Amino acid sequence: MRERVVLALMATLLPVAVMAQDSGKYQCTYGDMQRRVEIVTEPGVEVPCSVHYFKDTEAPGEQQVLWSAENDGSYCRTKAMEFVAKLEGWGWDCGSDVDVDESEPAETDEMLGASEDEEVQE
């Protein structure tokens, strides 16, 4: 009986865990400060993609495009995860976030002038 309950619970939670992993949205906190890292793409495609960085408490409504790619969607995912790991190394507490507020549309790379090799300094 317990095995069935555990299996049912795992079957319910596993899709949520996978969805959180693949959200491409990371929420980070450090004390009262909040930051977000998001992978932005058109719905249903991996490229073109861009990695956006938000300093929600210090600069509300502003965003930076850290990296972008035209041909390789894994580039954006890798760069986003590396940057999140860097933030965590600096003491930020980060996690994947599927409930990020998307009320403001993200700006396109062309509008922000980012390129695949461009990095924003912290």
Image (cartoon, rainbow, N blue to C red):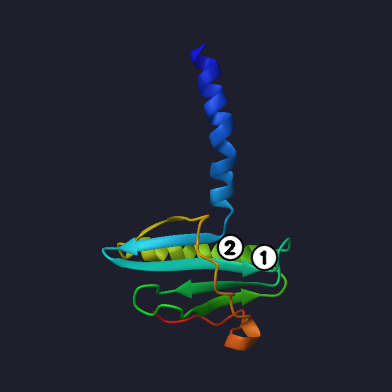
The amino acid sitting under disc 1 is Gly
Q: Is residue 60 left or right of residue 7?
A: left
Which residue, given by chain and number where applicable, does mark 2 sit on?
77
The residue positioned 52% from the left and 11% from the top of the image is 1
Outermost residue toward the top?
A: 1
The residue positioned 43% from the left and 61% from the top of the image is 27
User: What is the tally of numbered marks visible in this picture?
Assistant: 2
The amino acid sitting under disc 2 is Arg
Q: Residue 93 falls in which quadrant of the image?
A: bottom left
As drawn, the label of residue 97 is none
Residue 16 drawn at (x, y percent): 56, 42
Outermost residue toward the front?
A: 103
Residue 75 drawn at (x, y percent): 62, 67
Label 2 sits on a secondary structure element that is helix
The residue positioned 36% from the left and 61% from the top of the image is 88
Tag 1: Cα neighbours inside 10 Å, few (<14), some, or many (≥20)?
A: some
